[in-house]
Image: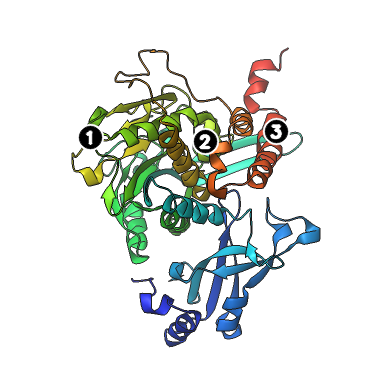
Amino acid sequence: MDYTVPAEARESADALLAWAGANEVEELDIRFTDIRGMTQHFSMPIEGADAALFAEGFGFDGSSVRGFQSIDQSDLILRADLNTAYLDPFFARKTLAFVCDVYDPVQEEPYGRDPRGVAHRAEAYLENSDIADTAYFGPELEFFMFSNVRYKVDQHSSYYEVDSHEGFWNTDDPDPRMSYLNPIKQGYFPLPPLDKTQDVRADMVAMLLGLGIDVEVHHHEVGGGAQAEIDLRYQPLLQMCDTVSLYKHVIKNVAQQHNLIATFMPKPLFEENGSGMHVHQSLWKDGQPLFFGDKYANLSQSAMWYMGGILKHAASLLAFTNPITNSYRRLVPGYEAPVNLVYSNRNRSAAIRIPVYSNNPKTKRVEVRFPDPAANCYYALPALMLAGLDGIEKQIDPGDPGDVDLYEEDIGTPVVPGNLGAVLDALQDDHDYLLKGGVFTDDIIQSYIEYKRVEEADAVAMRPHPYEFQLYLGC
């Protein structure tokens, strides 16, 4: 089914409302993104909307959104980006949804802490630079699908339990569907019946296509317990950020239709591969690719410097690309996680890989492999681009490539920090490159560090871990 809205209907609020009326739309759904990358929304009957409301903006309480306003300055407004409008396939009543930018109603300016505003400013900064005018991104998001998840945390108890309808831990289950199980870390590319999520992924792909999102490929991932990957075709920065938000919405809701729980938590299973978000990226100018050349792996000098910038700023970048405490359960050696801060062609143990499937200049790109799908792309993709641009501006040498199995051979490369607190410290010390062009601001960075440290890093660190009872109860 086609859930897209025609281009002519997205030219103005009047045109959109007229199209909605002709197509029996009953409700509008107004959406924006918070600092965690979570989509927030509220709905209204379409009878209450007119073009004047779209122009004025949709008001909401910014103090109730994590990381936004204080209660004494709570009022904010949302202004729709009509180009993002679509029919939401998961609502019972016909609903027209769209993404909004957050505005300050007093200053009548974009709200400084709006993550989508960061992506807007990143594109504007690039367009005004002498380096390039377009940055293309192609993230590969991995995720797990579970049949049930149970957890509890309070002052005197803490546990979690995960079930998978194709998990290796259910070997005593009499259900005949459990006869074919993927061993741990051996879930890559099996045919059904080992791949029990083929039809689920196919339904997800069909829904994505119906929403106008181009999908390149889907498959079972390495994780035996129903790990999956559905790859998106590359897009410009802001458009890809919007697409990833919608992608996550689709994945979670289609999984629920199959009585499954989809999670983008990077490392939900002990001793199993975690979920990454490898980010392919390239710069273009005047319709021409800038990363193809005569340097290592047919890269241009600009591409080499771009990698140098990302490797130099990797520790602080991780605060946005790997933004939760669980991210650092994945970033450990031995589980295909790229902890080594070095580049290489074909080598998936390096932080940056240069794919060599094709020598077409238009497909030449770099793949940054350490990010994970918990990232808020409105922060993560601009941060990656700004680090790369800093590398080009300062001609940062990325060093020698790491063309060996870095899990087996130590060549002395630096590695990623080991926890969220360490990368927040790195962001505090190294963020000037993010402030260029006003893309990020000191307020965004300081409020982000404070939120992440108090609500996540410290909150996890202060709680006893269940495994500590096995280790230390007899002390």
Q: Which mark is residue 261?
A: none
Q: Which mark is residue 458?
A: 3
| Secondary structure category for the residue under label 3 | helix
Kindly identify the residue that appears in the image at 67 percent across and 46 percent down. Answer: 443
Q: Position of residue 307 (x, y in %)?
A: 39, 32
Residue 451 shown left or right of residue 272 in the figure: right
Q: Residue furthest front?
A: 130
Whether residue 273 can be seen here: no
| Secondary structure category for the residue under label 1 | loop
Judged by depth in the image, the label closer to the viewer, 1 or 3, is 1
Mark 1 residue crowding within 10 angstroms, few (<14) / some (14–19) / many (20+): some
| Viewport quadrant of the N terminus | bottom left
Kindly identify the residue that appears in the image at 72 percent across and 56 percent down. Answer: 69
Q: Label 1 sits on what residue type?
A: Val
Q: Label 3 sits on what residue type?
A: Asp
For label 2, the residue is 317
Which badge, 1 or 2, comes first in the chain's sequence? 2
Residue 205 shown left or right of residue 169 in the figure: left
